[in-house]
Amino acid sequence: MEEPPSPPLKDNKLLKGVFAVGGIMSTLVIYGILQEKIMRVPYGPNKDYFIYSLFLVFCNRITTSAVSSGVLLASKKALDPVAPLHKYCIVSVSNILTTTCQYEALKYVSFPVQTLAKCAKMIPVMIWGTIIMQKKYKGQDYFLAFLVTLGCSLFILYPAEGDISPYRGGESTIWGVSLMMGYLGFDGFTSTFQDKLFKGYDMEIHTQIFYTTVCSCLLSFTGLIIQGNLLMAIDFVSRHHDCFFDIALLSTVATASQFFISYTIRTFGALTFATIMTTRQLVSILLSCLWFGHPLSWEQCIGAVIVFGGLYARSFLNTKKKPLTLENTENRTSISPKGNP
């Protein structure tokens, strides 16, 4: 009796899972290490620091818009905007402010602090969801959000001695926390407004990415001209070729991560994607501590355990029932381009 033929590659869930996990982990972990290196490690013999955050936003967005337009043309899909252009501009402005706050915060807080603080975005997502989408959340949502926020607060407010910011004599908690609050607020608005666009208009993912990033390119380019930083940023990367390479690689992995995120959500769903992203954040923190020598206080260790325990608990609870509204809001919109994913 002949054995049944092995399932084709496209039906092999294990290989698909390895592909999805490997792609997300590799691109986003590399992205995290590169953004810390660019913003916190000096270049050249004179120890020059790269300070042009908006230039990084521009490079990321122009790369993503080029790739997304190529995908649309290759698939022979229409480039019609579907939604009014001003709504894409609203997302773009919020997205630029989100990413700029993210890069600027690295001048005052370490990457592990910033990464863990991002987990607290549940609170602004719930606030904006209530205001914009008129959503109602369960008590479990509020409890988990409080738990994660508590862990993040411990991690931010009790830094270890010796983790010095290159831009100040030490970590500036006030500036760092202020920028991270700006990041969380703008990021929560961006996610919620993108969710509203997806529900209000029948649009392809790459269409939304294309028009949002094109608007972001124009806005970030205009901002660089107004600030007078465009030529200075170009001069910096021309003098420091290793910085140019880092920025090019940063933009490449940021764009590649969008493919893996989209593939994972479509193949395995938002719950699996949320679990992978939580694991990625933990790995990024550990690698940053090892690579850049960030010490951790015992309060920060406790905060990290609380945060990741809460996030994994949410994923575990959601396996037994329909995913929470909060999770749907967070992960559906995670497909959209962000300088931080």
Image: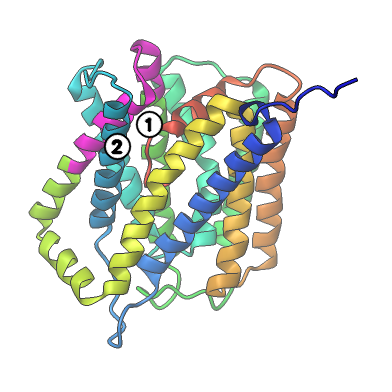
Give the number of marks.
2
Image quadrant holding the N terminus, namely top right
- CB under 8 Å between callouts 2 and 1? yes
Residue named by callout 2: 94
Residue at far bottom of view? 45
Q: Earlier in the sequence, mark 2 or mark 1?
A: 2
Residue 170 place in picture, x, y as percent:
44, 75
Residue 52 part of the magenta segment: no
Q: Tell me the kind of residue under disc 1.
A: Phe
Q: Circle 1: is it few (<14), some (14-19), or many (20+) Cα within 10 Å? A: many
Q: Is residue 65 above or below residue 327?
A: below
Magenta stretch bounds: 195-217
Q: Position of residue 78 (x, y in %)?
A: 24, 18
The structure's colour scheme is: rainbow
Q: Secondary structure at mark 2?
A: helix
Q: Is residue 99 visible?
A: yes
Residue nearest the observer in this picture, 60 or 172: 60
The residue shown at (15%, 48%) is 221
Q: Position of residue 118 (x, y in %)?
A: 50, 46
- Label 2 neighbourhood size at 10 Å, few (<14), some (14-19), many (20+)? many
Q: Vertical placement of 107 versus 7: above or below?
A: below
Left or right of 267 in this view: 65: left
Q: Relative to 131, say whether 265 is above or below.
A: below
Residue 236's spot in the image, x, y percent?
Answer: 20, 71
Q: Alpha-carbon distance for marks 2 and 1?
A: 7 Å
Q: Main secondary structure of the magenta part?
A: helix
**What residue appears at the point 63 percent right and 20 percent down from the top-left corner?**
138
Pointer 1 residue: 189
Q: Give above or below for 230 relative to 18.
A: below
Identified by mark 2, the residue type is: Ser
